[in-house]
Amino acid sequence: MNEPKTLSEAPDFLEYVYDKLWQAAGASEEHARSVARGVSIGDRTGKLTQGMGVLDVIFFSLAAGCLDMQAVPKIVDEGPTWVLYDGGTSTGFWTLELATKLAIEKARQHGISIAMGRNHNDAGCFYAYTSLAVEQDMLAIATNNSVPIVSPWGGRENKLSGAPFSAAAPGGEEYPLVTDIACISAHDGNWSEAAYNGTRLKGKFLVDPDTHELTDDPAPYILPVEGYGRICGSRAASVFGDPRLYAMNIFTEMLSTVIVPGSTITPDLPCGPETSQRRRKGEASVGGSCVIVIDPSHFGPIEGVKDRSDRFVQAVKSTAKLPGVDEIFLPGERGHKSMETNEPVSILESHWQPFVDRVAKYGLNIDTLRTDWQGTRV
């Protein structure tokens, strides 16, 4: 199987361009900063479809009239340990960064807090939010729903979301503990990556709409969207490869919509099995979201938390290895190392040219931006 073609770029340069590009599209400086940070964390942690590629998703929402650049996420209700934000069809990047920061402040006072969101668009890589808590020596759990792009176990009609799930806890001398996954075997970014790069999915996760047979080849079913390197529709519904992942997906729905007032459950979001991107003007792609923050220093010394985390990491990494294994890694460890060292990041070639074209569309030039960015480093 061929590997998709990638190129390397400096993550700081890309983050600089993301900021300038989102401002050129009409965002405020604060909004652009949130988007740039969130997209960059996707790049820096090696998530090929949740870094630069995820810009396609919010630009698609903008073009479809589903994202309001003038909207400012607002608090609609709150208590001492909880808050409810309405995104007003802004991005999830901005909505969830605001929500997480307030949840951190509430957890600092009360030990635990929950921030809920609704009516916002895509939020990208969810470690962008749980990492905010880790920086404050706190634990966080975060998720949201999305348009339906996967069938329930045993089904062949998309009714469930491609939900992200992130949990992170602080470490001491060792790296923090991180779980950051998509609760779906193959989402639309995986379909487009495989189809546009001539590769296959990692399993038979698509259902042929005529024969109902499972396949790992998305190419016959993909509905490309001109001008985008990640966005695509699909005539084929998708399925889970594991019932445990199906159960985890249901858990994210509990957190992101069932308990969130005024949210929209995934089956009620606009979508059809022939395309993951059918949208109604003025309706956001995310119906609900949730961030839970715990400040463990309320329950005992934070030094004890860090010590237990470090000893756990050391025990796991010192495990006897299978033949051919050079090192045992914790989930998220390599991504965290990449963030610390600021090493070049990989970008899919199929994402790069649409990105450069979009930069030009908004009156910017990628080479000029590179020169400007280099000037900021002096």
Image (cartoon, rainbow, N blue to C red):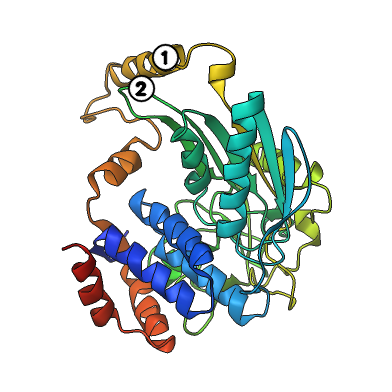
Asked which secondary structure carries label 2, the reply is loop
Quarter where residue 376 is shown: bottom left
Spatial CA distance of label 1 from label 2 is: 8 Å
Question: Label 2 neighbourhood size at 10 Å, few (<14), some (14-19), many (20+)?
Answer: some
> Sequence-wise, which precedes: disc 1 or disc 2?
2
Residue pictured at 60% horizontal, 36% vertical: 105
Q: Nearer the viewer, residue 76 or 220?
A: 76
* Kind of residue indicated by mark 1: Glu
Looking at the image, is 28 positioned above or below residue 292?
A: below
Marks 1,2: beta carbons within 8 A = yes
Depth check, front residue: 212 or 280: 280
Q: Of 254 and 74, which appears nearest the observer?
A: 74
The residue shown at (49%, 12%) is 301
Question: Residue 42 at x, y = what percent?
Answer: 42, 54
Mark carried by residue 230: none
189 left or right, relative to 266: left
Helix, strand, or loop for circle 1? Answer: helix
- Quadrant containing the N terminus is bottom left
Q: Is residue 252 above or below residue 370?
A: above
> What residue is drawn where x is 60% and y is 81%?
63
Residue 172 got which mark?
2
How many numbered badges does the structure rendering display?
2
* 274, 121: nearer the viewer: 121
Q: Does 121 appear above or below 154?
A: below
Residue under pointer 1? 303
Residue lying at the far left of the rendered structure: 378
Q: Residue at x 65, y 34 (%)?
A: 106
Q: Is residue 190 left or right of residue 113?
A: left
Amino acid bearing label 2:
Gly
Give left or right: position of 50 versus 315: right
